[in-house]
Amino acid sequence: MLIKKLSREVINITPLKNEITSLTQSFASKQIEIFRWLHQHPELAYKEIKTGKYIQEYLESLPGVEVSYPVAKTGIKAVLSGEKSGFSVALRADMDALPVKEETGLTYASQAKAMYNGYETDVSHVCGHDANMAIALGTATVLSQLREKIRGKVVFLFQPAEEGAPTGIDGGAIRMIKDGVLENPEVKTVLALHANNTCYPGQVMVREGATHASQDSIFIRIVGEQAHGSQPWSGKDPIVAGASLINSLQTLISREVDLQKGAAVITVGYFWGGVKVNIIPEGADMGLTVRSLDPDNRDILIKRIKELAHLKADMHGCQAKVVYGQHYPLNINNETLYQNLLPTLERVAGPENMLYYLSSTKSEDFSHFSQKLPSLYMYYGTAPQDKPLAESKLNHHPEFRVDKAALEFATRLECNMLMDLLENPEKLPGKK
């Protein structure tokens, strides 16, 4: 990870910074309590019922906060109005958990279970969304006590289904946008902070431009003709056709896209067909994820995967049916917003704790916000401080855990960024 030390002129807001620090410290024990409750009650995409109700009731207890619930099925929009007129800025916190069994051994570890794709599964917050929510609630708590100093409004967006919605259903970000969360009041910019275990509490990972690749889910069914395994010539084998397709897909990456423009990935996540060793099945199914850091490369891959599927199926006397699933666009951090908020980030974290990360082939449905408005997506460190960084388990690992020190720090960071933007509207892209 590259450490970028940048010298910037820092506005003298020491009294406000100190007040934010004092308020976040006072809230720390309550925030840990909130975090642990959320950790113990994880819910999957569009099933965040207990989570949503808990957040709704908490936000409604804060002065100056107007809550809309539900939006985007299980999400929440809350508007904190300052006592001075000004613009509106938004903060996104994701709510959903993952179908993963937690193996941290924590006293407050998740014991939750749910149905997922027709099967019972364990559920846990191994991506850190419990921390993201607890931090956003901390920010709402602190800023609700500073209303007389707030110029404008802060819109808190608690978003469901960031980890992916069921096939055929929009993810949480695009659904929130369709439900009008960026209107009334009109939001000028959206920020998001996310837990990351590749750095420690107090460290911030940020960059300008493309941060996360576009993502496309593609489902392919190869239809052949069933036959006895002892006489394969009497049928058309979709397994062989599918295997040929899988082996050829990677040549699209190595030979047909310009990787100088940015990384691209095709991964076949599953491939199955048949039920018995001596029966050639009638059909076989596969599911792909396609990632690209360049829009032109993405267009090439989407087109050529379909063409190649039909070609390989036809070569083996089969047919291919290609269905396009969920799409996340490229996530873009607005360069003006990035440059204008660097002084704030450095003031709160210290220049030595600013980590400049590389563009990732991971995807984020926050990208829908970044395509709509000038936005900034960054990471805050959550790696346990009692272990070497190399031993920290990454997001989505069963042993992933968040160091509680990250909560207070990230809350201070969010409060300072939001206050700086509202107090200095010239920092907003397009505003003078």
Image: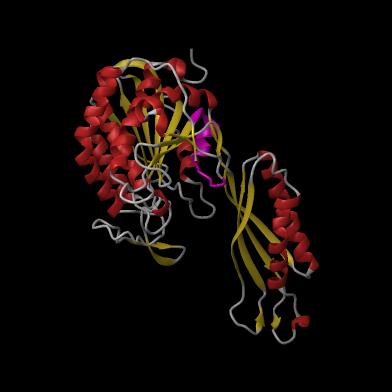
Residue ID at (53%, 28%): 334
Tell me residue 401's x, y (percent): 34, 52
Q: Is residue 225 left or right of residue 340?
A: right
Which range is magenta?
A: 361-375
- Tell me if I can see residue 375 in this picture: yes
Residue ID at (49%, 37%): 178
Picture layout, residue 111 above or below residue 280 = above
Q: Quadrant of residue 14?
A: top left
Work out whether residue 348 or residue 212 is closer to the camera in this orientation and state it. 348
Work out whether residue 183 or residue 211 is closer to the camera in this orientation and state it. 211
Residue ID at (79%, 65%): 314
Tell me residue 46's x, y (percent): 41, 50
Picture layout, residue 132 above or below residue 311 = above
Tell me residue 274's x, y (percent): 61, 76
Residue ID at (66%, 64%): 221
- Magenta stretch holds residue 372: yes
Numbered disc total? 0
Work out whether residue 11 or residue 391 is closer to the camera in this orientation and state it. 391
- Tell me if I can see residue 64 in this picture: no
